[in-house]
Image (spheres, rainbow, N blue to C red):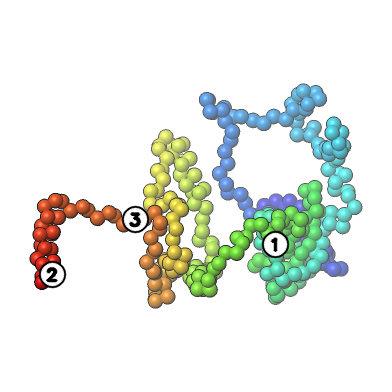
């Protein structure tokens, strides 16, 4: 398990549960160094003091707040830790809300495990974990950490408490100007979209992998061994601006999704013929040569004499 990042207690009414906060995820991204392209020498960022015009060490660096232009106020870590906040050393539960009421856009992506700290915390920890597991509610709490107070969501996973950091309400931007205005969508198209959603529904997403990282690792491995990197696949089609029949596209998507799951598409996924786009034109008819045209004209003359009789 990773080392604890913070230690304190969960404050739940009059109940106090000592806990340790540990990262619930790990960053598996491939990281690069900055190098000089001519000789691959490392390029480093060095920290200089403007006043003394010299490089300073990490031990000499502190925090400063700009009150006004050319005026800074020094703030120490000890002063930040000793601020009179009830959440300074506690995860204070302030409310319980239905899990479905939390807008996913408020999830910041930072998740942490909460481990009970000591045997005295085992029973109250298990109590709140089992109580949350028996209903559809999650706990909303406040926590002061890393120089700011954070809003967190507490939920249960396999008997353990997990904290997800939330964005404050004023940190979420307004979306009123993003949705299309007065766009007509038929009930049939919505029904087809619902069928596509049903055909792509799954209870397990553990099989999805980071394909970009795998491809990048293959490139780096080839470069390290002096080989040419793998060539990109030519099977994928470039996205284009084709105008397609939305209903036909939905039906075709349903058919492919059902086929991928080994299901019989049946009659519901029948695909209609795509309408031709304005750019698509019928090929021009070939102009008959003079001999063929003369023969055709000669063949038609008797018919005209019969009609004149």
Looking at the image, is mark 1 or mark 2 nearer the viewer? 2
Going by the image, does 214 lie left or right of 9?
Answer: left
Q: Residue at x 66, y 61 (%)?
A: 104
> What is the spatial separation of the Cα atoms under label 1 and label 3, in whole angstroms?
60 Å
Q: Quadrant of the C terminus?
A: bottom left
Q: Residues within 10 Å of mark 2 (few under 14, many from 20)?
A: few
Check disc 3 and report the residue beneath it: 281
Q: Nearer the viewer, residue 48 or 301?
A: 301
Position of residue 119 measured from the top left corner of the image (x, y, whole percent): 77, 64
Q: Residue at x 80, y 64 (%)?
A: 93
Query: Does 229 appear above or below 48?
Result: below
Residue 308 tag number: 2
> What is the spatial separation of the Cα atoms under label 2 and label 3, in whole angstroms?
40 Å
Q: Is residue 20 visible?
A: no
Residue 162 tag number: 1
Position of residue 248 measured from the top left corner of the image (x, y, whole percent): 43, 67
Q: Residues within 10 Å of mark 1 (few under 14, many from 20)?
A: many
Q: Nearer the viewer, residue 92 or 130?
A: 92
**View extreme (top): residue:** 53
Which comes sooner in the sequence, label 2 or label 3? 3
Which comes sooner in the sequence, label 1 or label 3? 1
Position of residue 100 measured from the top left corner of the image (x, y, whole percent): 68, 69
Picture quarter containing residue 22?
Answer: bottom right
Q: Residue at x 85, y 40 (%)?
A: 76
């Amino acid at each position: 398990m990773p080392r604890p990042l913070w230690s304190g207690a969960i404050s739940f009414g009059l109940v106090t549960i000592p806990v340790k906060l540990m990262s619930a995820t790990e960053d598996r991204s491939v990281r690069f160094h900055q190098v000089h392209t001519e000789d691959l020498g490392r390029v480093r960022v060095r920290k200089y003091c403007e006043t003394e015009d010299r490089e300073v060490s990490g031990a000499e660096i502190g925090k400063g707040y700009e009150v006004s232009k050319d005026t800074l106020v020094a703030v120490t870590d000890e002063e930040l830790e000793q601020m009179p906040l009830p959440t300074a050393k506690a995860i204070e539960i302030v409310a319980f809300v239905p899990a479905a009421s939390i807008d996913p856009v408020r999830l910041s992506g930072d998740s942490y495990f909460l481990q009970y700290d000591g045997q005295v915390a085992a029973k109250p920890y298990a109590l709140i974990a089992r109580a949350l597991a028996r209903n559809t509610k999650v706990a909303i709490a406040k926590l002061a950490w890393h120089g700011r107070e954070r809003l967190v969501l507490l939920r249960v996973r396999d008997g353990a408490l997990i904290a997800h950091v939330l964005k404050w309400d004023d940190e979420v931007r307004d979306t009123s100007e993003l949705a299309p205005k007065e766009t007509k969508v038929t009930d049939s198209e919505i029904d087809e979209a619902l069928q596509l959603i049903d055909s792509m529904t799954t209870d397990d997403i553990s099989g999805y992998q980071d394909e970009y990282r795998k491809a990048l690792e293959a490139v780096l491995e080839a470069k390290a061994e002096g080989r040419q990197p793998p060539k990109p696949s030519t099977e994928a089609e470039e996205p284009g601006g084709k105008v397609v029949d939305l209903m036909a596209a939905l039906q075709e998507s349903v058919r492919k999704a059902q086929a991928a799951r080994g299901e019989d598409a049946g009659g519901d996924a029948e695909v209609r013929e795509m309408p031709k786009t304005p750019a698509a034109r019928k090929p021009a008819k070939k102009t008959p040569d003079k001999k063929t045209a003369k023969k055709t004209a000669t063949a038609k003359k008797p018919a005209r004499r019969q009609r004149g009789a």
